[in-house]
Structures are given as structure tokens and as C-alpha cells.
């Protein structure tokens, strides 16, 4: 059987646009004499659609569009994902179309993602169908684990998915498929969502695996793609990207894809960013220039009396190498004016976080003015390490409409910077990579005044956040107990800041507010 895999970038709520994409792919599959064409889970609606799934008119429009799609399926079968209203509630369904008719709806069983809970109800999970004389099992979502229950006469498992990208999840996905294909002796064909949907990015990377557990077809990551898999034809096995360099490349591509689609699907065009001469804003500027076009990125350099000359120069060099527009607006006089105004409150007191935060908030005022005057969208330049520890200022450097790197640890920002320089030719000045991290909000300030190097900090944070380890486990692994206790206290104390962040693109397997959702008021000391 010839199976076409249509990996398309859908937009949530754009039922008409999604329908036309699907029909175009059906026509392409017919021209290649495919027997069947597969589309991703909730292809017609886009996902996650949240409360749209509770609107009857929305669901009816999806069904109407499906009827139009079915009318194009002469001589070819199709499996299309959509939300479908049943007596028990809305299911995430795979609609099987043959001979221009919708024959049945196969619903997803395991509802595990928070974005679906309360909007989607569980269903059977999989059903059998004979397509062009070929016995198949149609599976929705992550129900591949049920293959051991399936009829032994099933030749091919057809899985439609909406699996988001997360570091390490791609290897896990295909290793699970390989084991299932090899043990059960069945072909597995998987079509995944691709593209950004606000804080989620779907990697695509759809593929087909033969009964020997070999990858026969592998579609592109973070791009629309289309391929034909012939279950009877000999194949040359494909290798899955799994090296360290592949991982950094995929993170970069995911960030660009998520940012590009956030702008494109919301009809935004221009981005504003603050350039400090530090690693975080440098990486965000590079991603923005790549994803949106350098002509659509505008930067402000806002040095204070505490900013070093080399930081300002580094920021200028970066902007010029990227070819983005920029202005230098010193904030020293503004800062002094604010402090003079506040003398009845702050006069005679020691310099502390108050003065530091005022600088960060002044910069945000200027960036928001740039956003408003140029009809731009302000990009946040945070990272996961600082977000976890609270090394950020509410209504200051936590501001922005979108955070593209807020789910990446500080050490990963350096990995990305090195990758960018390796691929794009030393865009980021080496002095930015070499300098010791500092927010430059007081004389001679360094992040290491408060904590050990980020390589150590990030290793502890990863164990606490991603792996959920207790402090005692981390200390037993060889980390300093005082540092571990301090980091834990900082994480717990700063939940209030994380509750007020802009949307953060989810690039890890454990993002704040989603996979790790803590109560704001919480006295549990684990």
C-alpha cells in the first residue's frame, strides 16, 4: 500500500485555510497514485484550541469542512484529525474517509496533556479498518502502547499525533516506535503536527517505520513536508538525528519556528528588543533576525552609569553584524531624575535592589514606547536559570509580549550562541561569550557574587526542576549543601514572578506553569 504523509502547518481556528491545505495535499497524493493520505491530529481545527472546543458552531464548521474534504477523495482514502462532538463530549478524532464518504470517527483514549484536560473526553483509542485490501489499525495520539492488544492480522499501524517539541522527546518517540514495530512485526506510520501555536511548537518529524524497526521515511523537522511510503518497496533505513550538535540545532530551529509562527499567525510583523551586550539579548536578537527578517527587528541600547563601555560596544557590533536598526539611549539622566523624585522615600538609605529594579523598569518604559511608536512587538530576553532563581525584575526585564528563550537554561544560551557563530559566521562578538555574566545594575556587579558558575547552578536546577529530585539526593550526588539549599529557597520564593511572565515558548520537557505547575501560596518545603 502506498501511504502519503502530509505534514502541514495549521492555524488554530482557521478552518477554511486548514481545509484548503488538506485538499491540496489530497490532490498531490492522488497525482502520486497514493492509496491513502494521512493528516495530523486536530488538523482541521488546529491545536490547542482550548475553549473553542466547547463552541458547538466551531465543531459544526469542522464537520462541514470535513464533508467538503471527503468530496475530493475519489480514488483515495484519507485520515483527517479533527475535534468531533459525541454524546459524551468532544473527542480528538481521526475521521476515516473512503469513496468520498466519512465512514467512521476513531477517538483518542489517553488525555494526558493539560492543554486538553477539560476540553477533550477520552474515547476508544484505536479501531481497525481495511484500506485497499490492507488491514490497518487507526490510532489517535499516544495510544501506540496498546499495540500488544491488537489483532495479529494488522499489517500497518496508522498514528496521527499532535506531539509538541521538547528537548530529548524526539529520540524517546522514535525509540518507542522502533520497539513496537520490531516486537509486533508491524509497519508504523506517524503524522505529527508541525509549527508554532503560541507557547507550543510542534516539531513535525513525521515518519514511517517498517516491521524490522527501521526508519523508512523521515520528514523534516519544523517545516511542512510531504512523502510517500510504500509498504512493499525495499527501503534504505534513515538515521534519526541524536547527537549533541543535532540537539542544539533542533533547539535553534524550534525557537525560530515558534517565534516566526507567533508573529505570522497573529499578523504581527516587527519586533522590538533591548540589547545589553549580554549573551541572552544577543541570542534573542539573532533568532529574531533569522525568523522575522533583519528589516523587521529594531533594538534599543540603554546604558546606565553602571554599564561598561565594552558592553555598549559589543551590542553595537552585534546589531551592525545582524543588520538590524538600533538606537543608543542612555538612561543615566532619567535614572537620576527618578531617584531625585524619590528622595522623600529613599533618601539616606543604602543602595539595594530598589535602585537596581528602577533601572530595569526605566528600560522597559523606553522599550514599550518603541513598541507603540513603531507598531512592534516587544521580545523578552529571559532565560530559565534566571526565571527559576528570580534574578529578574517584575515589570522590568520580565516584560514583553513573548519570550522565545525563557525555557532555556543559561548554559544552553551559550550553546546556542556558539551554534549561531559556527553556522552564521561569528555574528555574536567573542567578547560577549567570554565576559562574565552580569546585569550591570551596580558597580562591578557579577552574577558569581551571588552564586557559583552557571554550569553548576544549571546542573542543580535541572535535577530539581526536570528530574524532580529532592535536595538530599542532589547533595548526595556531590553538590555543596549550602548552594543547593540556597537555590531551592530562591526557586520557592520567586513563584510569584513566574506567574506574571509573558508567554514562554516551551522548549524543554518540563516548562514552568505547564509540566511544573506550583501553587503560588505554598509552604511545602521539599
Image (cartoon, helix red, strand yellow):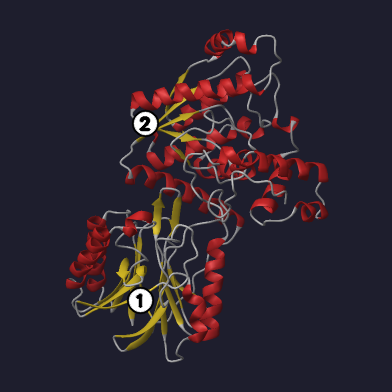
Residue 434: x, y in percent? 66, 33
For the point 32% across and 55% down, the residue is 52
Query: Residues at badges 2 and 1 in contact (C-beta under 8 Å)?
Result: no
Q: Please say whether residue 214 is visible from this viewpoint.
A: no
Please tell me whether residue 436 is drawn above or below residue 526 in the rendered image: above
Q: Quadrant of the N terminus?
A: bottom left
Q: Residues within 10 Å of mark 2 (few under 14, many from 20)?
A: many
Q: Secondary structure under badge 2?
A: strand
On residue 106, the disc is 1
Please tell me whether residue 276 is drawn above or below residue 420 in the rendered image: above
Q: CA distance from mark 2 to mark 1?
A: 43 Å
Residue 390: x, y in percent? 63, 36
Residue 365 as seen in the image, left or right of residue 460: left
Residue 157: x, y in percent? 42, 80
Q: Residues within 10 Å of mark 1 (few under 14, many from 20)?
A: many
For the point 52% across and 85% down, the residue is 148
Camera-nearest label, 2 or 1: 1
Q: Secondary structure under badge 1?
A: strand
Lower sequence index among marks 2 and 1 = 1
Residue to which mark 2 is pinned: 376
Residue 133 figure quarter: bottom left
| Residue sitting nearer the eye, 63 or 40 | 63
Give the mark count. Answer: 2
Please tell me whether residue 315 is drawn above or below residue 495 in the rendered image: above
Q: Please say whether residue 367 is visible from this viewpoint.
A: yes
Residue 284: x, y in percent? 50, 37
For the point 60% across and 59% down, the residue is 243
| Residue sitting nearer the eye, 233 or 145 | 145
Please tell me whether residue 522 is drawn above or below residue 243 in the rendered image: above
On residue 260, the disc is none
Residue placed furthest toward the bottom? 153
Amino acid at each position: 500500500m502506498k501511504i502519503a504523509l502530509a505534514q502541514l502547518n495549521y492555524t488554530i481556528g482557521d478552518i477554511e485555510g486548514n481545509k484548503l491545505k488538506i485538499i491540496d495535499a489530497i490532490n498531490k497524493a492522488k497525482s502520486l497514485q497514493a492509496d491513502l493520505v494521512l493528516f495530523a491530529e486536530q488538523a482541521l481545527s488546529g491545536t490547542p484550541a482550548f475553549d473553542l472546543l466547547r463552541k458547538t458552531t466551531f465543531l459544526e464548521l469542522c464537520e462541514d469542512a470535513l464533508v467538503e474534504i471527503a468530496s475530493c477523495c475519489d480514488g483515495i482514502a484519507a485520515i483527517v484529525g479533527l475535534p468531533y462532538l459525541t454524546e459524551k463530549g468532544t473527542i480528538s478524532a481521526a475521521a476515516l474517509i473512503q469513496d468520498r464518504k466519512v465512514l467512521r470517527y476513531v477517538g483518542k483514549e489517553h488525555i494526558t496533556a493539560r492543554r486538553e484536560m477539560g476540553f477533550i473526553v477520552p474515547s476508544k483509542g484505536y479501531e481497525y479498518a481495511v484500506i485497499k485490501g490492507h488491514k490497518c489499525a487507526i490510532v489517535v495520539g499516544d495510544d501506540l502502547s496498546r499495540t500488544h492488544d491488537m489483532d495479529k492480522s494488522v499489517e500497518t499501524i496508522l498514528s496521527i499525533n499532535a506531539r509538541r517539541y521538547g528537548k530529548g522527546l524526539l529520540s524517546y518517540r522514535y525509540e518507542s516506535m522502533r520497539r513496537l514495530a520490531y516486537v509486533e512485526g508491524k509497519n508504523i506510520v506517524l503524522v505529527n503536527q508541525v509549527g508554532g501555536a503560541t507557547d507550543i511548537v510542534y516539531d513535525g518529524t513525521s515518519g514511517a517505520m517498517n516491521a524490522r524497526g527501521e526508519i523508512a521515511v523521515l520528514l523534516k523537522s519544523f517545516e511542512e513536508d510531504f512523502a510517500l511510503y510504500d509498504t512493499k518497496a525495499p527501503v534504505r533505513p534513515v538515521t534519526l538525528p541524536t547527537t549533541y550538535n543535532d540537539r542544539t540545532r533542533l533547539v535553534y530551529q524550534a525557537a525560530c519556528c515558534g517565534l516566526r509562527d507567533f508573529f505570522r499567525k497573529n499578523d504581527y510583523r516587527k519586533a522590538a528588543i533591548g540589547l545589553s551586550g549580554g549573551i541572552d539579548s544577543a541570542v534573542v536578537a539573532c533568532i529574531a533576525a533569522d525568523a522575522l527578517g533583519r528589516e523587521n527587528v529594531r533594538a534599543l541600547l540603554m546604558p546606565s552609569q553602571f554599564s561598561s563601555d565594552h558592553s555598549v560596544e559589543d551590542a553595537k557590533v552585534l546589531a551592525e553584524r545582524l543588520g538590524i536598526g538600533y538606537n543608543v539611549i542612555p538612561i543615566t539622566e532619567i535614572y537620576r531624575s527618578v531617584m531625585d523624585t524619590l528622595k522623600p522615600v529613599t533618601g539616606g538609605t543604602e543602595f539595594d535592589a530598589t535602585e537596581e529594579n528602577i533601572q530595569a523598569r526605566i528600560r522597559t518604559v523606553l522599550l514599550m514606547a518603541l513598541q507603540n511608536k513603531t507598531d512592534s512587538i516587544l521580545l523578552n530576553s529571559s532565560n530559565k536559570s534566571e526565571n527559576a532563581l528570580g534574578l529578574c525584575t517584575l515589570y522590568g526585564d520580565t516584560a514583553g509580549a513573548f519570550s522565545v528563550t525563557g525555557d532555556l537554561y543559561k548554559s544552553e544560551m551559550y550553546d546556542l550562541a556558539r551554534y549561531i557563530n559556527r553556522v552564521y559566521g561569528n555574528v555574536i562578538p567573542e567578547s560577549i561569550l567570554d565576559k562574565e555574566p552580569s546585569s550591570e545594575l551596580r558597580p562591578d556587579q557579577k552574577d558569581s557574587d551571588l552564586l557559583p558558575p552557571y554550569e553548576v547552578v544549571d546542573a542543580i536546577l535541572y535535577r530539581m526542576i526536570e528530574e524532580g529530585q529532592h535536595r538530599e539526593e542532589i547533595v548526595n550526588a556531590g553538590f555543596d549543601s549550602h548552594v543547593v539549599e540556597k537555590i531551592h529557597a530562591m526557586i520557592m520564593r520567586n513563584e510569584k514572578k513566574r506567574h506574571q511572565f509573558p508567554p514562554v515558548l516551551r522548549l524543554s520537557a518540563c516548562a514552568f506553569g505547564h509540566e511544573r505547575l506550583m501553587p503560588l501560596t505554598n509552604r511545602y518545603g521539599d
